[in-house]
Amino acid sequence: MSADDSSTGDDASASLFGDATHARAGAYEVLARKYRPRRFEDLIGQEAMVRTLSNAFETGRIAHGFMLTGVRGVGKTTTARLLARALNFEPKGKKPKGESGPSIHLDPPGVHCEAIMASRHPDVLELDAASRTGVADMRDLLDSSRYGPVSARYKVYIIDEVHMLSTASFNALLKTLEEPPPHLKFIFATTEIRKVPVTVLSRCQRFDLKRLETPLLAQHLSGIAKQEKAKVSQEALALVARAAEGSVRDALSLLDQAIVQTPEGEVSGGAVRDMLGLGDRTRLYDVFEKAITSDPKGALAELKEQVSGGADPAVVLKDLMDIAADVAVAQATGDEWTMAGPSDWASRTRALAQRLTPAQAARNWQLLLSGYGDLQLAPDPATALNMVVLRLAAASRLPSPEEAARMISEGARSPGKPDVPLEPAPGAARGISSFADIVRSLTEAREVALQVDTERFIRFASVSAGKLSYALAPGAPQGLAGRLKTFLDNETSLDWQITESETDAESLRERERREKAERITAAKEHPFIAATLNAIPGAVILDVTDDTPPLENPAPEGNVIDMRTRRPA
């Protein structure tokens, strides 16, 4: 809902929400009710749903059941009432017969609009499934559905929090939902779409109401603040929008509360921070910057002042996570990146993005995310917050993952067992005189199953023209040597002599596993990598490979360490 849209309602439309009654009574009406959307055009961030409904109404392809889902405060109940109005819309004044029909254009309000939005229309019944979950309630509802509407076009049942219905209630509903009478429409709303049976979902037209992005929500709040003649700073609006987490209702409730904080003068960011227990966002940038530039003393001093001033440690850590995420996104999207809040927030975010590599930005986020889980379990959240920031500062002294890759490539590799000879031997039999030739021939012949078994279980002792000496690794399938002899005989037109013998050779897979373990062991012994693993709880080295992906800053060819962190089980 834009600021202009919400201010155009006349007395008639205002009365749809009880505004006129409240005004006459002299009672204050909270912003969440006062600025509830009156038309589909007033819905913000739900353009896809409005477009689909508009097309359905224009073509007459109107479903008999609608499922509205989304988080709290995104407008499910309001949308349900708007939809009930649209289904029963009848303009005031006499119209030629057949001209009137369902319409999403609800301005000016129609004959039934006021009663529907006030929840007192006899043909539009609102049911809260959270308080009426029993099958008896559902049967009573369905019994009454057999009768036609009293005055409206359709009888509409709005069932809120439909996921709370019992299994028996859902079963009772299914038959009517599958073959509803022509005068009946169902509108369901839920925050837990996964708890709704698929049999019900498949019989409804589903609309997922989206969370509002923070910049759009902040812009919406700015328009409302102007209509309320309240001075609210840009920082305060951004803080409220972020705290609402995409919920318009929560945002309006917080804005209502913020305006009361400063009845005279401008609502500052500081007032909102005190109200919500937030840290000073500008100073949190200082904390983050000091931590990633190896200044733990300065970072802890800033944190101490924030927590002493009343900031919640969990909220402070979440704000630091937001900063880390903004830095990573700004780094990835470049000039396309925007954010809600003062311009200095954006400039500092971009500056931080420029001084970090992509891998460092990702590592910072992972450290803070892991720390957030630790903070929930810690007996003293403030101490846990300090330790998380110290962990971030310790990681900043380590080389970036890109630099670690270069260091590993320059380090010495641990000596392993001698490789199985892959060079062709003299006296080749039709190109097969080595282990490599056998594998190549299996690949070219597309003998996938035999190739996999050969690489896993055949320990080649020696290969020469028409002769193969081998040993079997544990778990080898029965008849493997015979299958391989048959293939070689057919491939070379020779009678291969295949003999089993003792050997300390390895199969190809055994060799690969050994070399991988040796690479990882060598990497762990590198002082920088060892320090990285100690600084990041739960970090593991998955592999060290020669397939180095291109970096933004090209590094010399060599090994790359592929490290991923995970929280301890």
Image (cartoon, helix red, strand yellow):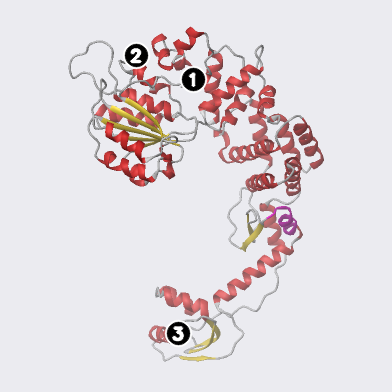
Q: Earlier in the sequence, mark 2 or mark 3?
A: 2
Tell me the amino acid under the disc marked 1. Arg
Mark 2 vs mark 3, foreground winner is 2
Q: Nearer the viewer, residue 130 or 215?
A: 130
Image location of residue 434, percent across then percent down? 52, 82
Visible residue check, residue 440? no
Q: Earlier in the sequence, mark 2 or mark 1?
A: 1
Image location of residue 133, percent across then percent down? 41, 38
Residue under label 3, please give it: 478
Q: Residue at x 45, y 83 (%)?
A: 480
Image location of residue 558, percent across then percent down? 64, 61
| Residue 135, numbered label | none
Tell me the amino acid under the disc marked 2. Pro
| Residue 33, numbered label | 1
Up the image or down, 532 lies above or below 86; here it is below
Magenta span: chief secondary structure:
helix
The answer to if 536 sits in the magenta stretch is: yes
Mark 2 vs mark 1, foreground winner is 1
The answer to if 413 sits in the magenta stretch is: no
Quadrant position of residue 28: top right
Residue under label 2, please give it: 108
Up the image or down, 42 lies above or below 406; here it is above
* Label 3: element kind: loop
How far apart marks 1 and 3 lie (CA) works out to 76 Å
How far apart marks 2 and 3 lie (CA) works out to 83 Å
Tell me the amino acid under the disc marked 3. Gln
Where are the magenta residues, as a range? 528-537
Visible residue check, residue 166? yes
Mark 1 vs mark 3, foreground winner is 1
